[in-house]
């Protein structure tokens, strides 16, 4: 699996790659990860696109974290990531929510911190492409983040309400929905020291449980 890495090759912070790492661990599938940098596009050209995660399983190549989750589930149905067709359909909604709402809400809190941890060779590309997207400098985007925290935390209200009734988004056991949210939250956890979640937030308690799964896969991950 090609996995986004920082200047430190052990620092893995991609919200999409983490979804795949948790999914593979859930399936009990061993994986060799290859550190990849934003400007290493030629190294994944074999996948026909330019983003990670990309997995190679024998001679099968799959890119896109959602497509990889479906591939893993179809190849190896148990233990299940989705818990059936209904669970797969609902997880698709969580994936769309994480990509369209959550990632965009987190980015302004950590975008300048990301610049500090990425490989030197990626910095010009990262600054230019992200500043074009935000139409502001990385510094301007991240500025004043403490004041923006309450509004950010509101976004997670549906998660809190759900966790009042069940231990995991998947119900009694974690499912791919948990890995989508948890993978997304590994992004700020690994790339930044800024605490997005309050210590007494039920989402923090849920994340702590997730970090301990699979021998502490998330807990033991390198952080900035
Ligand atoms: N929809 C894709 C998105 C993958 C993606 O955007 N990956 C980022 C790393 S977090 C990437 O490769 N970015 C390359 C770039 O920005 O040039 C997925 O779910 O895997």
Image: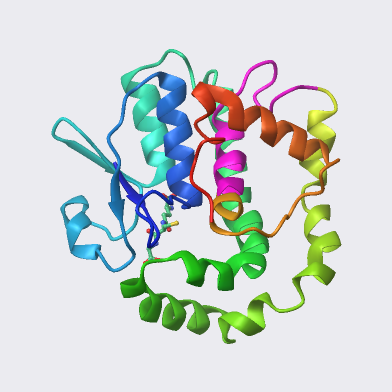
Q: Is residue 93 visible?
A: no
Please say which color scheme the image uses. rainbow
* Vertical side of 205 occupied by 199: above or below: below
Direction from residue 142 to residue 25 in the image, left or right: left
Direction from residue 104 to residue 130 in the image, left or right: left
On whether residue 14 falls in the magenta region, the answer is no
Image quadrant holding the N terminus, namely top left
Residue drawn at (57%, 35%) of the image: 219
* Vertical side of 137 occupied by 20: above or below: above
Direction from residue 110 to residue 1 in the image, left or right: left
Residue drawn at (22%, 55%) of the image: 44
Q: How many labels were placed on the picture?
A: 0
**In terms of depth relative to the viewer, which is nearer, 88 or 7?**
7
Residue 208 % position (x, y): 68, 33
Which quadrant does ligand 1 occupy? bottom left
**Range covered by the magenta-colored residues:** 166-186
**In terms of depth relative to the viewer, which is nearer, 113 or 72?**
113
Residue 147 % position (x, y): 84, 71
Residue 115 % position (x, y): 49, 72
Residue drawn at (37%, 54%) of the image: 4
Residue drawn at (76%, 50%) of the image: 197
On whether residue 177 falls in the magenta region, the answer is yes
Residue 129 % position (x, y): 43, 78
Name the image quarter holding residue 57: top left
Name the outermost residue toward the top: 78
Name the image quarter holding residue 174: top right
Q: Is residue 1 visible?
A: yes
């Amino acid at each position: 699996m090609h996995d986004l890495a920082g200047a430190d090759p052990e620092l893995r912070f991609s919200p999409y790659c983490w979804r795949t790492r948790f999914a593979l661990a859930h399936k009990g599938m061993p994986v060799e990860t290859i550190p990849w940098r934003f400007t290493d596009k030629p190294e994944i050209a074999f996948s026909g696109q330019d983003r990670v995660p990309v997995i190679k399983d024998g001679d099968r190549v799959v890119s896109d974290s959602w497509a990889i989750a479906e591939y893993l589930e179809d190849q190896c149905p148990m233990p299940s990531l989705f818990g059936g067709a209904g669970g797969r359909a609902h997880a698709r909604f969580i994936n769309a929510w994480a990509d369209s709402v959550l990632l965009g809400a987190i980015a302004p809190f950590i975008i300048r911190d990301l610049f500090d941890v990425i490989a030197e060779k990626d910095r010009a590309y990262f600054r230019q492409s992200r500043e074009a997207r935000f139409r502001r400098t990385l510094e301007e985007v991240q500025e004043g983040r403490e004041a923006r925290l309450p509004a950010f935390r509101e976004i997670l209200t549906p998660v809190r309400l759900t966790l009042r009734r069940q231990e995991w988004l998947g119900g009694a056991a974690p499912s791919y929905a948990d890995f989508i949210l948890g993978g997304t939250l590994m992004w700020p956890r690994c790339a930044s020291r800024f605490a997005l979640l309050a210590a007494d937030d039920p989402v923090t308690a849920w994340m702590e449980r997730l970090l301990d799964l699979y021998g502490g896969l998330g807990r033991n991950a390198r952080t900035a």
